[in-house]
Image: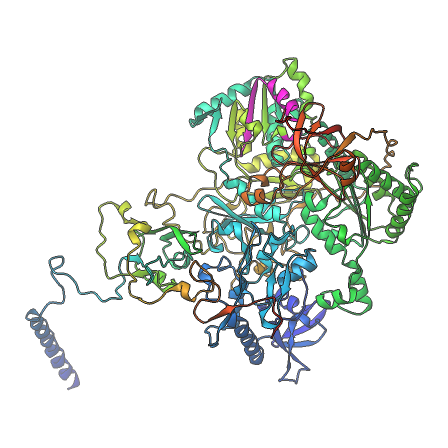
Amino acid sequence: MATLHIDGQAYQVSLGDNLLKTALALGLDLPYFCWHPALGSVGSCRQCAVLQYHNAEDSKGRLVMACMTPVSDGLRIGLQAAEAQQFRSDILELLMTNHPHDCPVCEEGGECHLQDMTVLTGHTSRRFRSLKRSHQNQYLGPFINHEMNRCIACYRCVRFYNDYAGGDDLHVLGIHNNVYFGRHEPGVLENEFSGNLVEVCPTGVFTDKTLSQHYTRKWDLQAAPSICMHCSLGCNTSPGERYGQLRRIVNRYHGEVNGYFLCDRGRFGYDFVNSSQRITTALIKQQAQSDPEIITKHWRKLCVDQKIIGIASSRASLEANYALQQLVGQDNFYQGLGLQELSLIKQVLALLKKPPATIATLKQVESADAVIILGEDITNTAPRLALAVRQALRNESFTLAKTLQLARWLDAAVREAAQNQHSPLIIASCHSTRLDGVASEVVSGNPETIARFAFALAHRLHGKSPSVSDLTPEQQLQVERVAKVLSKAQRPLVISGTGSHSSEVLAAAANLIKALPASHKMMSLVVPDANSIGVGLFDGSSFIEAKQRMDKGDIHTVVVLENDLYRHGEHAEISDWLDSVKHLVVIDHSLNPTAERAELLLPSASFAETEGTLLSSEGRAQRFFAVMPLSDQVKHNWRWLALAAADNWQQFDQLSLACYQAIAELEPALAMTPNAAYRVHGMKIPRQPHRYSGRTAVTADIHVSEEQQPQDLNSALDFSMEGSLGHRPPALNPGVWAPSWNSNQAVNKFQDESGDHLRGGDPGVRLFDKVYKGRWHPPAKPLPHREPSELVIQPLHHIFGSEELSNGASAIKQRSPDLYVALNPAQAQDLGMRDNDPVALHSRYAQYHLPLKILPGLCTGILGLPVGLPGMPVIEGGTTVKLHRLNNGEAGND
Amino acid sequence: MNSFKLCIDLILSQFQTLGTVLQHTFTKADTVEYPEQQVALFPRYRGRIVLTRDPDGLERCVACNLCAVACPVDCIALQKSEDQEGRWYPDFFRINFSRCIMCGFCEEACPTYAIQLTPDFEMCEYDRQSMVYEKEDLLIDGTGKYHDYNFYRIAGKSIAGKGKGEAENEAPPIDVKTLLP
């Protein structure tokens, strides 16, 4: 601790940070542009100038940049000193000389850091009379708008995009005050994190194109704390709604999970909520039915019979799945996953329940000093994790900086000193990945080879780990090299997951984690969906196995909860399965092939209209809340399930409590989030900002008298602008705003003294914190012999296209690839096939006709099959298939 | 003595007041025989709100939402849209005049002189629903009180017919590929 004097007042602060961060953490307002809490200091914008006094007698002081000044004991600072204020105001005036007269037609207006800082420094009227420089804009893809005139050249965009996120297609072009931030030519920004530019840019150069299409100012967005639905990491988001439409998603800071950044799938995948594919009315035998009594009667009639089974959903909340289990009974509860998917999830869950190493939060991932990724394409299956891994690779440079006595937040200096030095990253994958460029070692091979490599590595690190024998000399050398790196590491991290559809890879990863000698070892296992882990806590076998019971006539009604079964098996197989269902009830929010076959289709709420708990891949239980009220006939999924029988849960809290009590693992989550009775100063927490506009005009066209605001009995939040503006628990904070801070940078007013965590604790509860010894998994079976014509299916994941819900968003659709199957160039040549050739793929059930894509970097013997693209056959990874080139005349899919 | 004088003063004052009142009986009345006789209103009288057009005859409103947020009774609702030319415009623009208090904050907040209050207060309706004005009821053909202002001539955003560097006080666009100083 040190004493810091600011404007004559003494503060007790901790050493190690820069003055700007410390001042902000103390709650003081100090303007800045080029500094960003996650990007560090470069001291280029000169906006955070303060006076530093030599001693108590010194009244003159000298100007220093707060972001470049380390906090030291006895430091005396004049933040409000007249000279400092004048300097900051002058700097801002200079920055504004070229800024266009655009605010009314700028998407950033109302949440613009530049606007905030201009007001904060007191610069009000323009004195500069010369010409403003202007720039041409570029097309940057379906996510981001470009308006270069607004640039103040703070360099934050390129520092984020290139240095932090590893992008290589955004540059600084031109010289002196003509610098231009853009691509070498107009085109789609390729990096998976480009959406963060919207929040990183302090003004409106990069804005959210999807928001612009249905634009609403921040003060008009009704928001609620939510969790991203598009992968298993559980990033915290703050979606905003206006006029019954979900308008955008912005990052909601979480100190342990997503920090300041989201991936583009999470940020732009929300539009499915507004899609025309949404189910808005109940359908009985394909006929729309609006009478709630008839619907309930029909629904109850189908349930009254005891011959009913339920199929769970890994994209619905824990509570909804629990409600389903209560409706159908434990024995009739099936997982909505294929056999292989389920066994992989069970394998991951077994590792999570008794983890052989700390299950890393994303923040902890960033602290790893060596990372090994086994068979998981994290950039595409859990993108935010890939961003965290990129930060972990900087630890080498921080170690170096320490020896050079450089503070780690001196961004430019640390990067300059480290040059291209990275902490070790070992990637074992059957295809090239986006992280290959920063990897120190790439192990290329099919999942069997990867598993063998990891088993051998584990054996090399720990004698008791079972060994494998059939390794080539090169592989043995590679094992030796990697073993050396990993045994030196103090905080090694093993990343694996279900992405390669291989239980051997997971078993090998488990052995490797156990074998690592470090005491602070970590692991991170990726699963497909937002609640894959949560639904795994329920007992139940794969729905495929219910077929026998159906064929025997044991089952009359099948209730499918928010699940497209066609995504879990081959089309013919699932159709056959569904054919044997007598009465199919589907509860879902968007139309899909399964929903289209339902006898009774019940419209449920999307994540933006309902609430629930999700369990992320790190075993963190987190609540998400409804952003907007339910529309007409749509009900919460759990309400539909409650209605079918005893109607026992009128309020969400009752269900939530029952669910947490029923599942032993969820016990710590009981105290997680304040319940619906929670009040701040006796009032609920408003979802709408206090400047929400138009409440007496929004519905005036329908009826001039305003209706009562919709009541929310399920949470402590209210669909209103009235309520407490006082301090809310972080788990209930819809979004950040503070006086003078309208942009998302206001988050500094919600963080604790360290500036790293939210005041009141980061939301969510981790369920699996205790580390166990674990057991050794038996090694893989010897490699099977395969004919050269036989190919093994390998799932290929795409950040845009592989996830079900985000596929309903138009911006994401524009970025998803067309259907294809992929072969390695050499193998394609052997088979006499060329790029774009039509090929036929023979599986157990059918023959599929698809275009071939030659994919350099793919292993031989593998047929890459993109996952989840609409219309793509679903075949389990590891399945052996045959492929032949289609001649002219052969056409059409079977 | 003093209290006697005060008494006299007070009595005289009463007569003076009566006299003044009597005098007003013969002066011209300030009130007018409305509606037979119309009231003279000044151009800046705050009455019925209109949306104006710029000197080129195009909609001035850019749907920035500042009027809506400035409105103390929240009686303005609108939605931004963008046309082929790159101009922002309100897809719908609604004022609930049954709530409006004619305070003029919206006009003060408007950065494009689009929304203006006019000297017209004759807005009585039997049905309150008729007090809800949509864009077609609000939009007039003229420029209102401010004749010359055209926001897009000054803004940096390019629209059809006005590219980058063609706004007032703007230099031609930078060629980023040149290295000349």
Q: Is residue A512 magenta?
A: no
Tell me the quarter of the image containing the C terminus of chain A: top right
Say whether residue A686 is visible. Answer: no
Left-right relation of B145 to A673: left
Say whether residue B34 is visible. Answer: yes
The residue nearer to you, when weighing B97 against A705, is: B97
Q: Position of residue A137 (x, y in %)?
A: 54, 60
Q: Residue furthest front?
A: A888
Q: Position of residue A305 (x, y in %)?
A: 57, 17
Q: Residue furthest left?
A: B26
Range of residues picked out in magenta: A567-590
Q: Residue furthest bottom?
A: B1
The residue nearer to you, when weighing A891 against B67, is: A891
Task: Give me the residue at 69% from left, 27% from top.
Answer: A540
Q: Is residue A584 magenta?
A: yes
Q: Position of residue A90 (x, y in %)?
A: 54, 77
Task: Give me the residue at 29% from left, 61% from top.
Answer: B117
**Residue B144 occupies which quadrant of the picture?**
bottom left
Left-right relation of B158 to A770: left
